[in-house]
């Protein structure tokens, strides 16, 4: 519901037929099992809500790792990307609001209700022209921000290979639980400890660094930190050897550019 100012100056929302006062600290949290619910939100809400997806998929984990790599290596780029994406959502929501207002003015035109044409209603025409101009400005801003966000995302993809490797590495290590229940590896441990420590220990980039050098520079500390944390909890020597072979296979496939990592992700060849 839209908020409106009451006589006392406070905000209120109309629910049913009643005006209900709304505290400025009011927050509403909705939980859904199906992610499709968030996709169905109207555009005019996207600039005012935050959608949190707690499901763990390879793509979502890659996006999280990419954000952390960029934040550590190019913090200014990550800030620009987040700000551009946030502003783009607001502009898209504003554009949708203007379009809704135009439709509402057409439907509520006094000439239309009296049987006349829309062109006979001067107030409605002026309002439509103003809404049209605002919608045009919002559309231009949205187009500009889309280009900016695309440019920033393309620049961030310089760290895409390392982010993909990080997601796949967690996939390999999480499969250790199939070998023994005590080997369960939590995602929080991976992100907040292994990846965090690795980013702190990653050396700065050298001038003229190529993609292969960048991949090695970013992934070597992560392999060390994740392996160090996991290996100490493995009970048998053959389990440690199997984990090492699985990680080595993943490194080899990643360096060769092989996108089909299903065997390495599942770890079935060496972990079962």
Image (cartoon, helix red, strand yellow):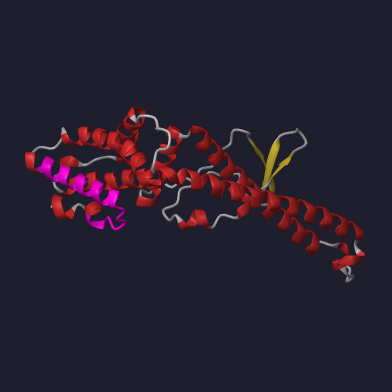
Residue 252 is one of the magenta-drawn residues = yes
Vertical side of 47 occupied by 26: above or below: above
Which residue is outermost to the front? 208
- Rendering quarter of residue 208: top left
Percent of width and height locating residue 39: 51, 56
Q: How many marks?
A: 0
Percent of width and height locating residue 192: 34, 33
Which residue is outermost to the bottom? 115
Q: Going 78% across and 56% down the picture, which residue do you hit?
A: 132
Left or right of 182 in this view: 257 = right
Looking at this view, is 217 or 106 the one in front?
217
Q: Which residues are magenta?
A: 239-263
Looking at this view, is 109 or 18 the one in front?
109
Majority SS type along the magenta span: helix
Percent of width and height locating residue 110: 87, 62
Q: Is residue 1 visible from the viewing direction of this image? A: no
Left or right of 194 in this view: 242 = left
Q: Going 50% across and 43% down the picture, which residue do you hit?
A: 29
Looking at this view, is 77 or 171 the one in front?
77
Residue 151 is one of the magenta-drawn residues = no
- Rendering quarter of residue 125: bottom right
Percent of width and height locating residue 60: 40, 48
Q: Going 89% across and 66% down the picture, which residue do you hit?
A: 119
């Amino acid at each position: 519901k839209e908020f409106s100012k009451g006589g006392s100056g406070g905000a209120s929302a109309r629910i049913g037929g009643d005006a209900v006062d709304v505290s400025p600290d009011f927050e509403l949290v909705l939980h859904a099992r199906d992610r499709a619910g968030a996709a169905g939100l109207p555009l005019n809400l996207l600039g005012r809500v935050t959608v949190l997806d707690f499901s763990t998929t390879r793509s979502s984990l890659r996006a999280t790792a990419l954000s952390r790599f960029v934040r550590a290596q190019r913090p200014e780029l990550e800030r620009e990307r987040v700000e551009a994406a946030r502003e783009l959502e607001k502009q898209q929501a504003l554009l949708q609001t203007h379009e809704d207002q135009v439709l509402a003015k057409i439907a509520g035109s006094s000439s239309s209700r009296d049987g006349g044409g829309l062109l006979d209603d001067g107030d409605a025409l002026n309002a439509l022209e103003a809404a049209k101009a605002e919608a045009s400005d919002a559309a231009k801003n949205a187009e500009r921000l889309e280009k900016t966000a695309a440019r920033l995302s393309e620049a961030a993809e310089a760290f895409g290979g390392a982010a993909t490797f990080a997601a796949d590495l967690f996939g390999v290590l999480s499969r250790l639980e199939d070998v023994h229940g005590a080997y369960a590896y939590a995602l929080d441990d991976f992100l907040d400890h292994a990846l965090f420590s690795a980013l702190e220990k990653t050396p700065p980039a050298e001038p003229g660094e190529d993609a292969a050098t960048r991949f090695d520079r970013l992934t070597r500390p992560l392999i060390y930190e994740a392996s160090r944390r996991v290996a100490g909890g493995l009970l048998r020597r053959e389990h440690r050897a199997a984990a090492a072979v699985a990680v080595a296979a993943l490194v080899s496939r990643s360096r060769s550019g092989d996108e089909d990592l299903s065997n390495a992700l599942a770890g079935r060849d060496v972990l079962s």
